[in-house]
Image (tube, rainbow, N blue to C red):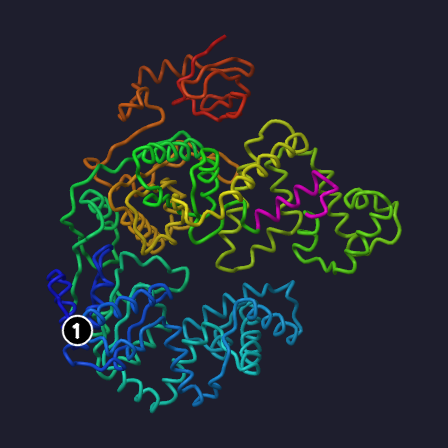
Amino acid sequence: MIDLTGLNDQQKEAVLTTDGPLLILAGAGSGKTRVLTYRIGYLLDSGLSKPSSILAVTFTNKAAEEMKSRVRELLMSSDLSSLVDEVRWVGTFHSICVKILKQYGGAIGIDSNFTIVDTQDQQSFIKIALDNCGLSSKEFNPKSILAHISSAKSNLIDPGEYQKNAVEYFHSVVAKIYSEYQGLLKKNNSLDFDDLIFTTVKLLKEHHKVLENLQNNFKYIMVDEYQDTNHSQYVLISLLANKYRNICCVGDDDQSIYAFRGANISNILNFEKDYPDSKVIKLEQNYRSTKKILQASYSVISKNVKRKDKKLWTQNEEGDDVVIYKSYDEVDEANWVVSKIKEMRDRSVKLSSIAVLYRTNSQSRSIEESFLKSAIPYRIVGGLRFYERKEIKDIIAYLRFVYNPNDVTSMIRVVNVPRRGIGDKSLEKALALSNSLGVSFGEMLLSQESFVGIPDKVLEFGLLYKDLVVNLSKMCLKDYIEFVIERTGYLKMLDDGSLESPMRIENLKELITVGSKYSTGTAKQNLGDFLEEVSLLEGVGEQRSDRQNEDCVTLMTIHSSKGLEFDIVFLVGMEENLFPHSNAIISESEMEEERRLAYVAITRAKKKLFMTCVHQRRYFGKIQRNSVSRFITDINPSIVKIIDFYDSDIENEEVSVISDKEESQFSKKFILKPGQKVRHSYFGVGVVIKSDFESVTIDFGGDIGNKDLILEYAKLELLD
């Protein structure tokens, strides 16, 4: 017997509502997985359904395994243990479609022993398709073409329809390759991931008996995370549920954050239009967060227009105020976060209960550096440490080879990145030649006109290398790193239209930001120090990267944090154009998605929430002064505690305000000139490098180095 006494009234209602269309709007931390589990248990316990007649679909393998595990645990703890192994239709969209195609795919010519190709195989097939069509993969990037084909399949557009709608030349090329690619897959008895759903929908639409058989079988259908479904998934579920209409969709439109992957929030928003006889149950009791954290989250998400209103409440404690720290810059921001975490660790708070969340992957760099320097263990979830990312390692390899002509290891890493047609034999021949001549490989390239026998492709690389070396003394390090990224063709290679392309380009721009710290002198003068700094950070990171079981802080993007929870959350980079992202500023729909992303971030916190912004940020090598994020100003001031870097008494955690009179005297007093000595309350004594009426650049020496300060806030003391 399934015991429902542990459920609240809304959860119990959702479990007991078995017939007809049902939409469960499950707010963050409201126990939706528990409801789905008990719903399956109740359907079996009440005799309403056989195990084989229940279809439960979710998105990730992890979520599917968790649901299977909970169902097994629930059935084993009741008198239904004999049914455990008969609950077979619980899984991801893709795994469910594989089962259907294995059983019925023969109706549309799909052999039951088909193979599923991975991304690498997909790219290989695209390259073959390009070649078969007389096109070059250098002119048309395979990743970009694959992204367009994937989008087409997610919208159930076949090659023929794609061709009809192709207006631009590139789209007509994609249509041609799409058709050829599908032919290659069929010839190899293979399907890609998008095909699994696309082909299953095709099967159900074209073969009524198969559809009827599956509709008769699946009397009860449940879909988790319905807000994340795309068009093909929506059509698949609609077809299967069309007979009994016992469809239960669980989701939260406020947590729809995957539009860039094709998710269509309209699917959940229009559920009641699709099923006019549907019932809607809201799960609004939150079991995760404090009252103040929930109040903050509602202040943000309630500004969205396209949403189904729900307001989370909790019986948890009131909790602490949301702490907002207005830091000087990204370094101070990272150091403040680390200092707070140190304080918590000293009070025996487990590091594993703490998370640092950021909008973009590239933001992790300054946070990581502060963690490494302070010996605070951390792990990156859903990605690599900054200096372990391929694009970063590649550009660092270029810089190392420029700095050290003997660094053959770095040269070998990038000599063919981007591809330059230098084969293994040509490279071996060139290396053997440099060894026989007794000169380094780099020196040989720089003086290639003096040597005979260097392969042609290596000679071409030598011209590039020579150009990189010559320009080393012509510009500052920041500009030089940017020059290397563009001159080598690396930026063009990354800009391939793939989903990960913008993120990888942002990482390279963040590397330029690191270089901008060396603002005096040429790249030639500073490259050695820069590479030494990178090597030290890499070394410390490698020493700690294998500590999987160590108590450590979690760092991740907000997208990666969905579905997780932590006692303490630091949400960094809360400024306009960073979060919300600059791409969303002029688009209402994208801004609403940014707001949902902020809601997801805030609701990861159980007990304490810290949000940080900066007065100025060195972003992609340039100083930016953005206003505080609207997602901070949306929050009711009564539940917020503000700490400001420029506060004269920061220990009291109150905001200081400069009067008009003080500001006037301040501006009048400090018209600084290069060479003058000044004292800053935080950075100490420094020498002015350059100044205007708004800002000043000061060299504080040592580890601090150069700092760009806003005169209005700097509160400098003139020493001479």
Position of the N terminus, as image quadrant, is bottom left
Which quadrant of the figure has residue 50? bottom left
**Dominant SS in magenta:** helix
Q: Nearer the viewer, residue 139 or 230?
A: 230
Q: Nearer the viewer, residue 45 or 224?
A: 45
Whole-percent x, y for residue 676 in the image: 53, 13
Which quadrant of the figure has residue 48? bottom left
Kind of residue at disc 1: Tyr
Question: Would you place residue 562 above or below residue 531 in this image?
Answer: below
Q: Nearer the viewer, residue 359 or 536?
A: 536
In this orientation, does residue 387 appear?
yes
- The residue at 28%/73% (across/down) is 56
- The residue at 34%/77% (across/down) is 236
Residue range highlighted in magenta: 391-409
Whole-percent x, y for residue 209 in the image: 33, 91
- The residue at 62%/70% (across/down) is 127
In this orientation, does residue 226 appear?
no
Which quadrant of the figure has residue 278? bottom left
Whole-percent x, y for residue 626 in the image: 40, 36
Give left or right: position of 236 versus 37. Answer: right
Q: Is residue 394 magenta?
A: yes
Question: Would you place residue 109 above or below residue 94 in this image?
Answer: below
Residue at which label 1 appears: 42
Q: Residues within 10 Å of mark 1 (few under 14, many from 20)?
A: many
Question: Would you place residue 451 above or below residue 225 in this image?
Answer: above
Residue farthest toward the bottom in the current orientation of the protein: 209
- The residue at 58%/29% (across/down) is 519
Mark 1 residue element: helix
Whole-percent x, y for residue 303 in the image: 24, 49
Give left or right: position of 714 versus 171. Answer: left
